[in-house]
Amino acid sequence: MSRPKKSRRVCDPPKMLGFTPYGIPNCKIEQVTLKMEEYESLKLIDYDLRSQDKAAELMNVSRPTFTRIYNKALKTIIKAFVEGKGISIEGGNYQFDKDWFRCKKCHKLIEGIDNHTRCKDCKMFGTEELINLNHSYNQ
């Protein structure tokens, strides 16, 4: 019996839900899925310019595990670029450091329920329009 996977630590959720390629009709776009921990690995290495050792430490995984996550993320992004597929950022085995919510209407990110204010384009105001992003998926 294999041991259960530890949740990967993710600091902040992405601002977007994914990307679509330019020049292909929306009805014909196929999707690839970039898991939340794969997104975080790309952000830490290529955006924040961290070393793989430091990035692995921040995600609470070993260096070899981090390298596998990062390489899988690169393969997913390259497949989307070469094959003209959309990228959906969702799922994975992750845990946020803080409580995060997203508005169902305008998709605004909210750090903690106490920071929730009425969105200017949203007619409703309350917790029922919020999606809790703090659960991890085992996919």
Image (cartoon, rainbow, N blue to C red):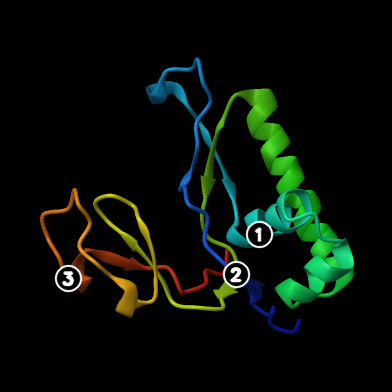
Query: For residue 126, which numbered disc appears in the image?
Result: 3
Q: Look at mark 1 in the image and give the residue it sits on.
A: 40
Percent from the top left, x then y, of residue 103?
Answer: 29, 59
In which quadrant of the rendered image does the C terminus lie?
bottom right
In this figure, what is the number of numbered marks? 3
| Three-letter residue code for mark 3 | Gly
Left-right relation of 59 to 25: right
In which quadrant of the rendered image does the N terminus lie?
bottom right
Query: For residue 11, which numbered disc appears in the image?
Result: 2
Decide: few, some or many residues near mark 3? Use Cα within 10 Å; few <14, some 14-19, many ≥20: few
Question: Looking at the picture, does residue 59 appear above or below residue 47?
Answer: below
**Along the line of sight, the residue nearer the viewer: 126 or 72:** 126
| Three-letter residue code for mark 2 | Cys
Taking the spot 67% from the left edge, 56% from the top edge, the residue there is: 38
First-in-chain label (1 vs 3): 1
Real-space Cα separation, disc 2 to disc 1, in angstroms: 8 Å
